[in-house]
Image (cartoon, rainbow, N blue to C red):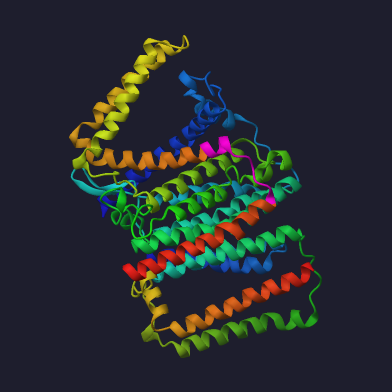
Amino acid sequence: MGSFIVITLIKVVVVFAVMLTTLAYLQWVERKVIAHIQVRPGPYRVGPHGLLQPVADIIKLITKEDLIPPYVNKPLYLAAPFIAMTMALLPIVVIPFGPAIDVAGYRTWMQLTDLNIGVLFVLAVASMGVYGIALAGWSSNNKYALLGGLRSSAQMISYELPLSLAIAAPLLISNTLSLRELVERQQGSMLEWNILHGPFPQVLSFLIFLIAGFAETNRVPFDLPEAENELVAGFHVEYSSMKFASFFMAEYANMITVSSMATLLFLGGWVAPWPARYGSSLVPVGIFAGAGVVALYHGMHPGHRRDRRTLPVFGVVFLGIAAFFLLPMVQAWLLPSFWFCVKTGSVLFTFMWVRGTLPRFRYDQLMGFTWKFLFPIAVLNLLATGFLVAWLG
Amino acid sequence: MVLAIFLIFAFIAVVCAINVVVQTHPISSAISLVGVMVSLAVLYLQLGAEFIAAAQVIVYAGAIMVLFVFVIMLLNAGAEVKHGRSLTAQLLGAPLLVALLGLLAYFVERLYPRSASVHFGGFTHGTPLDIGRALFTTYLLPFEATSILILIGIVGAIVLARKEMD
């Protein structure tokens, strides 16, 4: 009992430290990705390749003056960012990052806790997240903020339906609601993943899940609650300093949740795409060694003067990581986390890619799209999957 | 530990429920109602009804109350103005409330004898598996009848909404 509490506390600290660092750096990654899509360098001044930009942003946001306008409804105005942030961070407790591992004689799962209603828990917490945005919009007592809050609650209720239906289809195949068991049922090769699982590959419900996930997290092309050309800034127009930042952190945390749920439900969680006996454990070594060699080469032939010192350092670091992946004692926990991060990262990259590519929807298009297109397709997909599972399963 | 959690959330539920009535602004009342529903979900969870707890949060707190809040925001309802209470309400309100609570307590006491009192952790058949099996075997007919009732409600809502639009 005592060791259980200590282990859980350590896991909580590690998971939240990693989560909050990822939140800060995800913003740097997004700015870089969008910048490269638009053929510009992105953050470059603070630290090498702008790597210290998140630290500078955090210092700026903390030291900024925290204004509370006199006309707001104070209790709800103060509670709204808190609710948004809490509900965004909470789902991480049920998300598994890897299998059971042995650390210093104790056996523990790379997951904070496994609920037998894990999927429902994530849905429930996500459905509570809308209060943060809706209340922020209402309590600000500002018409732009109110419109943003209204739009976001209407949008989140509407897209929750196709989202839940898209989740139900892979659950029919896996026959469990526990996220840990969900991944264990997809073990083996890529063909066991729910997205490619016979008799009915869930490609369609994966796409519906992603689209509805974009809408639930208020991302482009569904970012109407904060459409700046119509609503100034939408629901957070009256917020400043860390209250404003907490809405952004909540948005990024929600992106991480949606991406990891996509990974767990459709892409096989921490499982490698093919078994280790065919060399899947050498993939990370190859990737990092290749990245290291490329960085070293560009360091030898620098495009900019500043690259002459930074790129060789990155190259050596990447080669070090590649060598680290070859150590047998760390492979047990490093390889699953690598595959989990790669899959979640790819989905996150899709989020950024879409943001850099697509324009925003018009409001009636947004509603028509979910009710007249996504929802019927999700129902049909669920029906077809149900029939096939009942017939062949 | 179990008792402490029960007491905390039972207290939150009661305080939020009183707050629903006491608050003058509709949004504050609605948010208090969300508080009641979430605390009830915790109590369901303690009683071993995991699926009901999750459904309570997803359906009531996450969907229905969001819709309530949405409508209140859309209508931009202001704070309620309190008028003086009528003489009947002033005289009979408190005694009737006590009488109602006493009556409820009496019936609960009569209908559920002490031998059948609730134990935390005594019931373990609240998983989605058990609920699904019960719904599609033992309670299939009531389940289907309720589904049709809800379908009629949806069709009715659409018909009424169309009339407004024309």
The mark total stands at 0
A112 and A388: which one is in front? Answer: A388
Vertical position of residue B59 compared to residue A328: above or below: below
Q: Is residue A117 visible?
A: no
Q: Residue at x 66, y 64 (%)?
A: B68
Residue A136, position in %: x, y? 65, 49
A99 and A378: which one is in front? Answer: A378
B119 and B160: which one is in front? Answer: B160
Q: Is residue A36 visible?
A: yes
Q: Residue at x 50, y 46 (%)?
A: A254
Q: Quadrant of the C terminus of chain A?
A: bottom left
Q: Which residues are magenta?
A: A353-363
- Give the quadrant of residue B158: bottom right
Vertical position of residue B23 compared to residue A190: above or below: below
- Give the quadrant of residue A240: top right
Give the side of residue B16 with respect to residue B9, left or right: right
Q: Is-magenta flag for residue A356?
A: yes
Q: Quadrant of the N terminus of chain A?
A: bottom left
Q: Is-magenta flag for residue A245?
A: no
Vertical position of residue A119 compared to residue A147: above or below: below
Q: Residue at x 68, y 37 (%)?
A: A67
Give the side of residue A30 with respect to residue A7, left or right: right
Vertical position of residue A146 compared to residue A308: above or below: below
Q: Residue at x 53, y 46 (%)?
A: A85
Residue A379, position in %: x, y? 51, 64
A240 and A231: which one is in front? Answer: A231
Residue A48, position in %: x, y? 46, 18
Residue A190, position in %: x, y? 31, 48
Farthest residue to the bottom: give it: B110
